[in-house]
Image: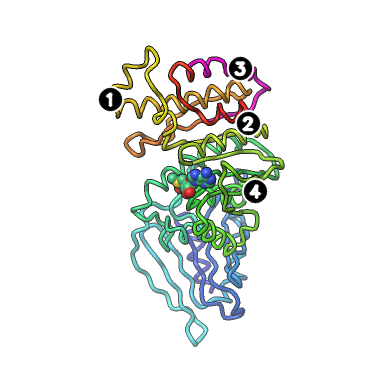
Amino acid sequence: MEKILAEIRSNQNKLIKIVMSDNISDSTKGKTTLHQIILKGELYWQSECIKNNQAHHANIQDFDLADWLSVEIPSYRQINLLCNGISITYFLKASGKYRRLQSSNNLSKAVETTHNKVKNYILAEGDNIPALIDLGVFNSDFMVVKSKYDKYKQINRFIELVDDIFKGTNREEITILDFGSGKSYLTFIMYYYFTVKKGIKAKIIGYDLKADVVADCNKIAEKYGYDNLKFIVSDVANDNLYNENIDMVVTLHACNTATDYALYNAIIRKVPYILSVPCCQHEINSTISNGGDLDIMMTHGLVKERMSALLTDSIRAEVLKEYGYSVDMLEFVDFSHSPKNIMIRAKAENTGDKDLSRVKALMSSYNFDHTLVKLLDK
Ligand SMILES: C[S@@+](CC[C@H](N)C(=O)[O-])C[C@H]1O[C@@H](n2cnc3c(N)ncnc32)[C@H](O)[C@@H]1O
């Protein structure tokens, strides 16, 4: 074992991941995986041990790694050390000695290992997020599955924007609602980000219409012991939703007016933060008619559709502003990467004037509907 520890110590800066498997002292334990994370600016190794199908985590400071492993390694028959380009495997032989094998790997995009560089990562390939394997975003080496690269990029960007909001806070708990959570890549990652990376107790609820998708997501959350991550079958337009303290509402491509219900719920519950990336803004496009200077934009279907989508989101931003939010609209991801790329980012500041007269004048000139305005007008 001393040889293994010596190899770890001399390669600690190059190591991406350590996997220990085939436990000889506890048959209920599956494999234990370690990878680097940053917690409150410090470099740690996070271990994840699967015991009775539940994931158990521990965070070990970088300088304590070898000591921690000296206790753990004797329980395992196989130890894998994954470095950038090289994988080393130790097998325990009947003689009690370990056999060492070395092979090359294609882990080219490793977790950066210098302190400052690691700090820049929010969600990196190589990060030990087993739920992402179940969701089909990572392969078993924690590398992004090619066909999911677009989604991976979107989630990463979303988390960067979440991080911008919460990185300076000392909060211990956070509650978030995700409207139209769907396959819930984002929802899982937010849970991982808050609970594992930030050490914040997170309660996250994802709402979606699709019962089968919701059941699958709940199963994965249960499998990894994500106790406060829940998915609920719900039509956000009609059902009663969680109504206690909520810190943030998020939507990522919640279809058409589902985004309006999310914003409405956030406004009436005075939710401090909203991050919303709308899509399928059909409502105005299907109701608008000629009525003034903008008629020129309604001659061609394609232009009408895009103009209607931009108008939908501009009105959402205006309504949020009138209800006391500071709002900015940002390019969420590059247009070539996804055309559904505008994020409405809002922060509650004050009570606002609640004056929707400008918006309503536009609606009556062009005779179109807008669900958010209708809901607040009730
Ligand atoms: C395009 S998917 C996005 C899923 C996920 N947020 C993501 O980015 O991968 C939109 C989701 O919104 C859900 N949805 C649409 N209308 C809804 C409603 N009224 N209530 C709840 N969910 C809704 C759909 O079922 C679908 O799963």
Disc on the earlier residue, 2 or 1: 2
Distance (Cα) linking label 3 and label 1: 33 Å
Tell me the tag on residue 202: 4
Name the residue located 54 percent from the left edge and 35 percent from the top edge: 275
Q: Tag 2: residue type? A: Ile
Residue at image mark 1: 300
Is the C-beta separation of discs 3 and 2 under 8 Å?
no
Relative to 121, is 227 above or below?
A: below
Distance (Cα) linking label 3 and label 2: 14 Å
Q: Position of residue 69 (x, y in %)?
A: 58, 67
Is the C-beta separation of discs 3 and 1 under 8 Å?
no
Disc on the earlier residue, 3 or 1: 1
Is the C-beta separation of discs 3 and 4 under 8 Å?
no
Q: Tag 3: residue type? A: Asp
Q: Secondary structure at mark 4?
A: strand
| Magenta-highlighted residues | 345-362
Distance (Cα) linking label 4 and label 1: 47 Å
Q: Tag 4: residue type? A: Ala
Is the C-beta separation of discs 2 and 1 under 8 Å?
no
Nearer to us: label 3 or label 4 = 3
Q: Position of residue 248 (x, y in %)?
A: 61, 38
Name the residue located 46 percent from the left edge and 49 percent from the top edge: 124
Residue 160 in view of the camera? yes
Residue at image mark 2: 267
Residue at image mark 3: 355
Distance (Cα) linking label 2 and label 1: 35 Å
Q: Position of residue 286 (x, y in %)?
A: 40, 31
Disc on the earlier residue, 4 or 2: 4
Within 10 angstroms of label 1, few (less than 14), some, or many (20 or more) residues? few
Relative to 361, is 117 above or below?
A: below
